[in-house]
Image: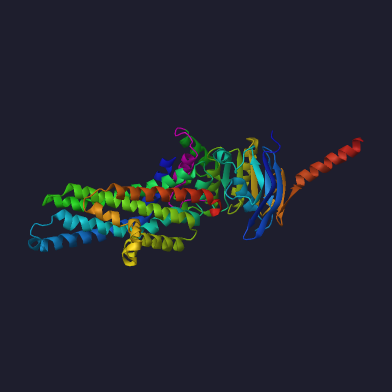
Amino acid sequence: MINSIIQHELRQVILSRKSWFCFALLQTILGCIFNWLVSKYLQNLTMLDGKYGVTEEIIHPYYAWFCLLVLLFVPMITTQSICGEKVNKTLVNYRIAPISAAQFMLGKFLAINVILSVMLITISLAPLSIMLSAKLDWGQFLTSILGAYLLLNAAFAIGLACSTFMNNIARSNIVIFFILLMFVLFEWAAEYAGSHAIFLQSFGLLVPLKSFLAGIINVKHTAYYLTIILSFICLAAWRYNKGVDDV
Amino acid sequence: MNSKYILADKLSYVINSKTILNSVDLAIAEGDCVALVGANGCGKTTLIKLLCGLLQPATGSLHIANLSHQNPAHRILLKQLFGFAPDQPPLYPNDTVYSYLLFKAQLYLIPKTEIPTRITTLLERFALSEYRNNRLHTLSKGTQQRVNLAQALIHKPKILIMDEPSNALDPEQLANFCDLIKTLRQEQITILIASHDYNDMIPLCDYMLRINAGQINKIPTPLQKAAAEITHDQFDYTT
């Protein structure tokens, strides 16, 4: 059942020109960023004096840029996934079928997960090409991928949950964008508000990513992302179950 | 045969303080073919969505084959009973006719080995074989409507609910649709058709339910009236 939903979602993505355009745009921007990072590294090579390697100087910022760029696409992807179905009146296909809310949400989430994994694999080819001329820090490289994967899954789960509450595509995009921005800004807000609000820092979506990009797998940070994913998927399933008037 | 296969008791639906259905009682027997008629906006689609569990009633209860949407344990079983063809076909524009029906079949957990046969049968039944590999957005409205009807029958439902099914059908397709309803009636499927067009429904249905101002009135079709009159005359004659 979940498998059929995943297959169907992937088919929709593959057959959509918009998704291919977005994918190509992302690859082009990341290609330019990678090129810029490599050029910058080669220019500063003598100044760095062997203090930092390619992984720190190229791969770390490359995955940070990747996360930032994909975060901008999250509202569009998640809105299309559920709110888009409501607007196009196709959600009724799922509503009248003998599937539970949890199966529906998992199907939608895992489909996005597959797309994200494909994106991660394709964009990781550029950093891997560095291996031809330099030595990669595999630990940092893999934790960067893991961090990006967890962060973006958390963002997608937030987006999906918000999308279930929305009935208008433009409004859904804006709301998801601002909610994600709020999660990103928690960190700065905490610093700005002072020591009494420092606990807010723990809710910042980008805070754990920094440690992953630095090559550290922290249980607290991993648990944070997993909690966000689980909580928002449950919220989305709950809302889907409650929102019978959506069709 | 269950005479109260679909049973609604004091069913009401209110949206934005406007009463769409007001304490409606309804009993439809198994195998009946019923037309739900009324002016646009009178609540036909609302009643249909309540029956399908797509809306929650404000008050009252609804039982279908002794199962209720309000009972979470019954929901999945109920969904297996229904085939629903909404007024706006719920089609994915990029899917082909075949892939869309395949997706629907998978959602209903039809065994993999059975799916191709079922789809082929439906494609033939609705004269869709030639469009098998066509994208849905390239089809005419009438053809899309036929795909809509086909998807509602993919899991061989016991109850078929159609909302304005004759929309966008040309006279020939309408005649085929009437033949389809007759065939389905022979298969003892309970059919509920919502339409604003009385004339299309008269030859198809056992009786009509007219929704007006939130209330439902049962009205016999002219054929039934004629039959009743004949029976009455015979009765008078023999006595």
Q: Is residue A11 left or right of residue A137?
A: right
Q: Is residue B95 magenta?
A: yes
Is residue B77 visible in the rendered image? The answer is yes
Horizontal and vertical percent for residue A66?
27, 57
Q: Which residues are magenta?
A: B90-113
The colouring scheme, among rainbow, by chain, secondary structure or one colour, is rainbow
Q: Is residue B203 left or right of residue B116?
A: right
Residue farthest toward the bottom in the current orientation of the protein: A192
Horizontal and vertical percent for residue B42?
67, 57
Image vertical order of residue A119 relative to residue A179, above or below = above
Horizontal and vertical percent for residue B109?
48, 37
Q: Nearer the viewer, residue A132 or A11?
A: A132
Q: Nearer the viewer, residue A130 or B69?
A: B69
Horizontal and vertical percent for residue A17?
36, 56
Residue farthest toward the front in the current orientation of the protein: A196
Q: Nearer the viewer, residue B111 or B76?
A: B76
Image vertical order of residue A194 relative to residue B236, above or below = below
Number of numbered discs visible in the structure rendering? 0
Q: Is residue A221 left or right of residue A247?
A: left
Is residue A10 visible in the rendered image? The answer is no
Q: Is residue B87 magenta?
A: no
Name the image quarter holding the N terminus of chain A: top left
Residue drawn at the location 15% of the way across and 59% of the way down: A38
